[in-house]
Image: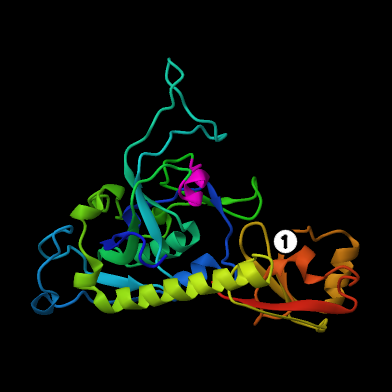
Amino acid sequence: MPEEGRWRLLNPLSIRFSQPRIAPHFRDGHLLEHTAFEVVETWLQDASLAGSAPPDAAEGYPPYDVVLHPPFPPIRVISWLPKLRRPDGEAERDANGDQLLGRRAWFALDNRRLHSLQCAAAKRFPRRCCVVVRCIEEVPGTTIRELRKFRTTTEGRSIEVGIRAGETRTFNWTQVAAPAAQVHSVDTDSLFAEELFDAWQWAPDLVRLAVKACQEEECEMQAATEGNGGYGGKKESKMAPCPENGWQYVDPAGNIQGPFPLEKMRIWHQHNFFYADLPMRSDPVDAFLPFSQLFPAGEEPFRGRVMRYRQSR
């Protein structure tokens, strides 16, 4: 997987979302907006050390002020002509019944990571940020599994954040940028990998870190698929007695509620307050799990033992 695609620099604000909705947190329970504050910045390679551009990349000096370094593996992007969809998700068609296509743009295959990167870049506006990405070649939708999830109804300019449909909030990076931010001021990156700046040339240290992160992620996913039912991520889990305090859950708006005492959780459970896929944990140091997975078969919720779980992003 790390060898797939070309390593390039892209402004995250010029990348679009491919899905209509994402969860407000990563698999390890970190909220997307909080993760944006973990993104750090560094400088491009000095021009005297960068050398010449490879023949399949842009020449000259990149028009960016800083390079962002996120606490997760790099996002994958693809230059794509999206299908135009109505708000209900159905494809728009012309008078002949043919599907209508939108304008070509870079679309992310890792939408939650893009959300955090856009928050980080928007907060730094008007400084122009870039990030190391892997540009995937355009291929038929049946080749890459994620392409079948391209269901955006806004051409990727915004995305709904929430756990349940109908209980979400709309995110667009201009919401967190300075009032003077304008979309036309960032949609200037080329739409083809051959015309983007080579990340190996201008951010070699970050590419090395990105390659390593991809390799580790691939190993973790393979181990998870082979050893723990395919849930994904580096997993540490154990059954432990229900703690008296520290219980938290993520509400439909993506906000962490709590910590609450065990007795209050019991009362809420008796009134059917919790639904099966509600993210919850019994201790702030743990990862969030769906409520249904915290208490395996035979364990009465909030009475005996609970699953303690940790997992990487």
> x%, y% of residue 239?
79, 81
259 falls in the magenta region: no
Where is mark 1, residue-wise? 278
The amino acid on which the numbered mark 1 sits, given as a three-letter code, is Leu
Q: Which residues are magenta?
A: 143-152
Task: Give the answer, above or below, for where 253 lies relative to 142.
Answer: below
Task: Give the answer, above or below, for where 134 lies relative to 90.
Answer: below
Q: Quadrant of residue 240?
A: bottom right
Tell me the element at label 1: loop
> x%, y% of residue 179?
34, 56
> x%, y% of residue 229?
69, 66
Q: How is the image coloured?
A: rainbow
Q: Is 61 in front, or is 164?
A: 61
Q: Is 191 in front, or is 270?
A: 191
Crowding near pointer 1: few (<14 within 10 Å), some, many (20+)? Answer: many
Task: Give the answer, above or below, for where 44 lies relative to 190.
Answer: below
> x%, y% of residue 30?
57, 72
Quarter of the image with the N terminus is bottom left
The answer, for residue 308, to whether it is visible in the render is yes
Q: Quadrant of residue 2?
A: bottom left
The answer, for residue 179, to whether it is visible in the render is no
Q: In the picture provided, is 64 more to the left or to the right than 231?
A: left
Quarter of the image with the C terminus is bottom right
Q: Is 55 in front, or is 240?
A: 55
Q: Is 36 in front, or is 67?
A: 67
Q: Residue at x 78, y 58 (%)?
A: 276
Q: Residue at x 46, y 47 (%)?
A: 143
Direction top: furthest residue: 95
Q: Quadrant of residue 180?
A: bottom left
